[in-house]
Image (cartoon, rainbow, N blue to C red):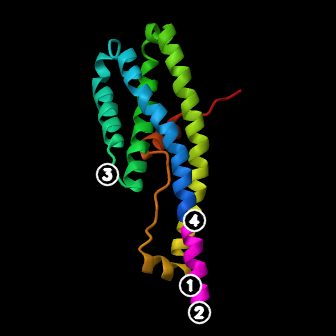
Amino acid sequence: MILAIVLMHNALVARKNQVDNAFSSIDVYLKKRADQIPALIGAVKGYMQHEQGLLTEIAELRSQAARSELGSNERVDVENKITNTMGKIMLAVEAYPDLKAGEQFLMLQRSISEIEEQLAASRRAFNASVTDYNNGVESFPMNLVANMKGYQLKSVFTIPLESKAQYEQTPDIQL
């Protein structure tokens, strides 16, 4: 009986550490993206007079994400909001052809796109680790050990509901 408890505890610890490791990989790309946000705001600020609320929101979210007291679930929620808001900004840019044509903005857009692609790959690995961990926390009999040790479910990175609605409203492309 004791051996089974020890094995389940060790399995949960391994899964938790895998989640932490996967989040560390994401954290590198989140930092790169956070470093690009001031440049993005600076590049679009003069053009996007009607979208000042979006620029303020992205700056506030960046500040929230930088706070060290956030738990991993809260950090995931804030980063999901940043992803959604950056998508809105990039969508709003479409209304400004002069901005889209500028060399500085094009380089910034390429850099952000590259970071987002790297983030997407890291998020997939993180979400797989979190799913494995959550399965362990919820599955019997491992959930008994998880409850004794205070392990809680972890959040995955998701597409915010607003973005999902936007994708659903986009008409299919006919070839």
| Residue underneath mark 3 | 69
Identify the disc placed on residue 1.
Answer: 2
Please tell me which of labels 1 and 3 falls first in the chain. 1
**Within-10-Å neighbours for mark 3: few <14, some 14–19, many 20+:** few
Q: Amino acid at mark 1?
A: Ile
| Residue underneath mark 4 | 15
Q: Amino acid at mark 4?
A: Arg
Q: Amino acid at mark 2?
A: Met
Q: Amino acid at mark 3?
A: Glu
Residue at figure coordinates x 34%, y 51% from the top left: 70
Identify the disc placed on residue 5.
Answer: 1
Residue at figure coordinates x 56%, y 69% from the top left: 135
**Residue 120, image x and y in percent?**
58, 41
Q: Is residue 65 left or right of residue 156?
A: left
Identify the disc placed on residue 28.
Answer: none
**Residue 69, image x and y in percent?**
31, 51
The region drawn magenta spans 1-14
Please tell me which of labels 1 and 4 falls first in the chain. 1
Residue at figure coordinates x 51%, y 21% from the top left: 109
**Within-10-Å neighbours for mark 2: few <14, some 14–19, many 20+:** few
Q: Secondary structure at mark 2?
A: loop
Using the image, determine if residue 46 lies above or below residue 131. above
Q: How many marks?
A: 4
Determine the image quadrant of residue 14.
bottom right
Pointer 1 and pointer 2: residues touching (CB < 8 Å)? yes
Q: Secondary structure at mark 1?
A: helix
